Amino acid sequence: MTQLIDLRRRGLLRGSGITVLSASAVALLAGCEKMASAQASNGASVANDVGILNTALALENEAISAYQLGAQSGLLQKPVLEVAVLFQTHHKEHRDALIATIRKLGGTPVPAKSDAEVAQALNAASLKNQTDVLRLAQRLEKGAANAYIGVIPSFGDRNLAQVSARLAADEAMHWTVLTQALKDPLPAKALSFGA
Amino acid sequence: MRLPARPRVLALAVLALAAAAPAAAADAAHGQELYESRCGGCHSLDANRVGPAHRGVYGRKAGSAANFNYSTAVKGSTVVWEEKTLDAWLTNPQALIPGQRMNFRVALPADRADIIAYLRQQSGK
């Protein structure tokens, strides 16, 4: 797995911190700078988009907790542990970007559930080894990618639909790495996501 | 193209049979695969996550899963989840219950039917 990801980037990501909007979050939002004013006259559409973004935020918060639980479980060894931390960093950047966008549109970001609540909902107590943790992460990443694809037709703003596609691409990348780590076969057919 | 009388009758008969044939039965096993890959990002059968727990959803009133924080729109809805309402929901949630928070759509009717068959099976209906 280390051959698939250049973990030297991790230091840069960690160094950027999460208290300020990350560079990628700023880039993600760059195409959406005008949408708040452009959509001001269409309140229902904006409210619906905020609703979608808040659901996405809840999904990202769950993913951050899931990787936290995995990292703290003692079940992950290097280099898998480092990759899990890197993926959690990606999800934190997604979270930051979503929160910034929700606020830009006049909405209120949903609060995150506690790690303990997420652990119970995901039945984390049943995880006994590294493979169990990877399987859970793989399942969640595929679900997240498909969720982002499945909401694309519902966005009123096409820029946000594009953001959703970019988020789905990140989740699909995570799924692919996890699938390789588990030595699962890659999909035999094309268009395996969103299906 | 105008068919001679006999082939025309045969063609009409075939069309009539096709129209009378029942739609392909929904496949709950395929529905499970779809549920896990498409719905599993936010939902589980037995736990409230981003979305509410789904076991027992078939036949249940919208917004009535225990301990889930629903949108005002869903909580106030009179929709009861069965074939038609679930199909409409998965086609376009906002069209069925404006103000909801799901917004996830399943484009193909056969996929929706299979997911609904799985949810119905898991609800013991």
Image (cartoon, helix red, strand yellow):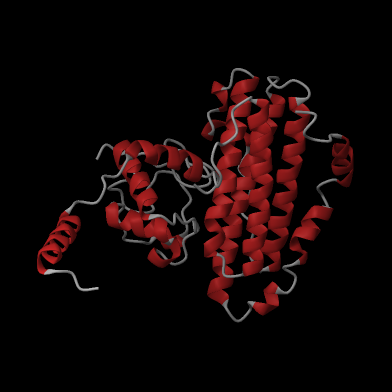
Q: Is residue A77 above or below residue A29?
A: above
Q: Position of residue A110 (x, y in %)?
A: 61, 54
Q: Is residue A62 above or below residue A78?
A: below
B72 or A136, which lies in front?
A136
Residue at 49% across / 55% down in the picture? B104
Q: Is residue A41 above or below residue A54?
A: below
A156 or A43, which lies in front?
A156
Residue that lies at the very extreme toward the front in this rendered image: B4
Q: Position of residue B55 (x, y in %)?
A: 36, 39
Would you say residue A141 is visible in this rendering?
A: yes
Say left or right for A101 vs A10: left
Q: Position of residue B19 (x, y in %)?
A: 19, 59
Can you tell which quarter of the image residue A105 is in?
bottom right
Would you say residue A21 is visible in this rendering?
A: no
A106 or B122, which lies in front?
B122
Q: Position of residue A71 (x, y in %)?
A: 71, 28
Say left or right for B71 vs B17: right
Q: Quick one: quadrant of the C terminus of chain B?
A: top left
Residue at 52% across / 35% down in the picture? A121
Say left or right for B101 vs B85: right
Q: Quick one: quadrant of the N terminus of chain B?
A: bottom left
Total labels: the figure holds 0
Residue at 47% across / 65% down in the picture? B99
Residue that lies at the very extreme toward the bottom in this rendered image: A41
Residue at 50% across / 58% down in the picture? B101
Q: Is residue B82 above or below residue A123?
A: below
Can you tell which quarter of the image residue A103 is in?
bottom right
